[in-house]
Amino acid sequence: MKLWQIHDSLDSRVESFTTGLDPQLDHELIPYDCAASMAHVNMLSSIGIITMEEASDLKDKLHEIVELHSEGKFIIRPDQEDGHTAIEDYLVDKLGDTGKKVHTGRSRNDQVITAVRLFEIESLNRICQLTESLSEKFNEFGASWTNTPLPGYTHTRKAMPFTVGDWAFAFRDALKDDLTLIRATLDVLDQNPLGTGAGYGVPLPLDRRMTTELLGFSRVMENPMYAQNSRGKFEARILNDCLMVLYDLNKFATDVIFFSLPELGYFSLDKALVTGSSIMPHKQNPDVLELVRAAYHQVAGYEYQVKNIPLNLISGYHRDLQLTKEPIIRGIHAVLDVLAIIPVAVSGIKVHTDQLNDSMTDELKSVQKVMELVKSGMPFRDAYRIIAQKYKKENP
């Protein structure tokens, strides 16, 4: 029986529609839901709602669920609707009436927010680790090519001299800024929503500071209505941070695709990174980098969903918010996948110094020539026109 069910009249078509993808999506959240439940039963025991023995039994079975989940053996049936029901059904099956006490003082609303938030915090910490490591990877790559010239481009035309090292350092620095944004979001997320119920509190003397400490949050999310109103808002912030990382890596991927064009030949990609064509036997395609580019747009779509689904709803919980779960989970996985593959791509870049030296043609020195005239005392605009006229004669 579902957690909310008090009658048997629900149309099966309505049941299927309202359940949606929750049975599949909630597999991701089972360990976090169990962690929150363990903290909750510890707290219930401390305030005398359940006995210490009941709390111990419940925690033992919750640990069993986590173990079964890690082995792929914990199943959420479609008729159970979500992971919360699957967990409670297991506890009731194993412990009888004691299992029925696990939901005391909770709503599915604060239960899901807490599980999702724990998942988000762990995921963002992982994204931070991978981003920091990738920033260092760019730093190492750049340090290997600090004196290797690279034409700088504006408007997709040669502009001024640059170096391969400084090109790589640009992505190192970009990711450092992204880390600042992510860490700020982690600070916002660091609020415990457990105990806020359906958005209006719980008429029990719940020790929310205890569960805050047990779950590793630094502070309580005090206002219960805001706990519900934060759904979608916090997820949009998380996905925007993911987008900033993907924004920079989109640019990196596009650069490498451009610089590795056979017509340019500044870079090439290790054969382990490229794919072929089913009809053209000569092709070596940078598919991995093209998918990195596309990931930005994919996650932008997820951000749009979580940002807009909650809009125009009055304060409090609405079933619309269920649909914010899929985009946050998929968006986080998308950025983690990209962060895992980019170091492989960086390691697979071959820099062709001969082609790069040959690419440093005279027009790249135009600004330098202008500045040499300026240093001799000539007004900048006059110097600019003199050098411009020179190149006009050379390239009529």
Image (cartoon, grey):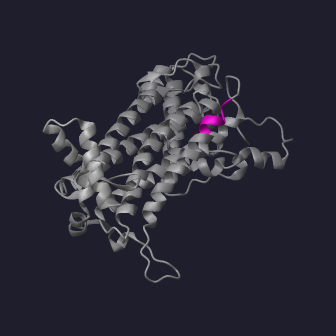
Please tell me whether residue 347 is drawn above or below residue 55 in the rendered image: below
Q: Quadrant of residue 58?
A: top right
The picture places residue 81, in percent across and down from the top left corner, at 70, 46
Depth check: give the residue in front, 257 or 230.
Answer: 257
- Looking at the image, residue 217 sits to the left or right of residue 41; the answer is left
Q: Residue at x 71, y 23 (%)?
A: 314
Q: Nearer the viewer, residue 221 or 287?
A: 287
Quadrant of the rendered structure where residue 116 is? top right
Residue 269 seen by the camera: yes
Q: Locate the C terminus by quadrant.
A: bottom left
On screen, residue 227 above or below 16: above
Say whether residue 5 is left or right of residue 178: right
The residue that appears at 77% across and 47% down in the rendered structure is 17
Furthest toward the left, the residue is 376
Looking at the image, which residue is at 48% across and 53% down? Answer: 70
Residue placed most toward the observer, 152 or 66: 152
Q: The N terminus lies in which quarter of the figure?
A: top right
Q: Is residue 308 magenta?
A: yes
Side of 225 relative to 170 (left or right)? right
Q: Is residue 73 magenta?
A: no
- Residue in the picture at 41% in, 28% down: 187
Residue 383's quadrant in the figure? top left
Residue 213 higher or lower than 223, as above or below: below
Whole-percent x, y for residue 133 in the image: 29, 48
Q: Is residue 216 visible?
A: no
Range of residues picked out in magenta: 306-311
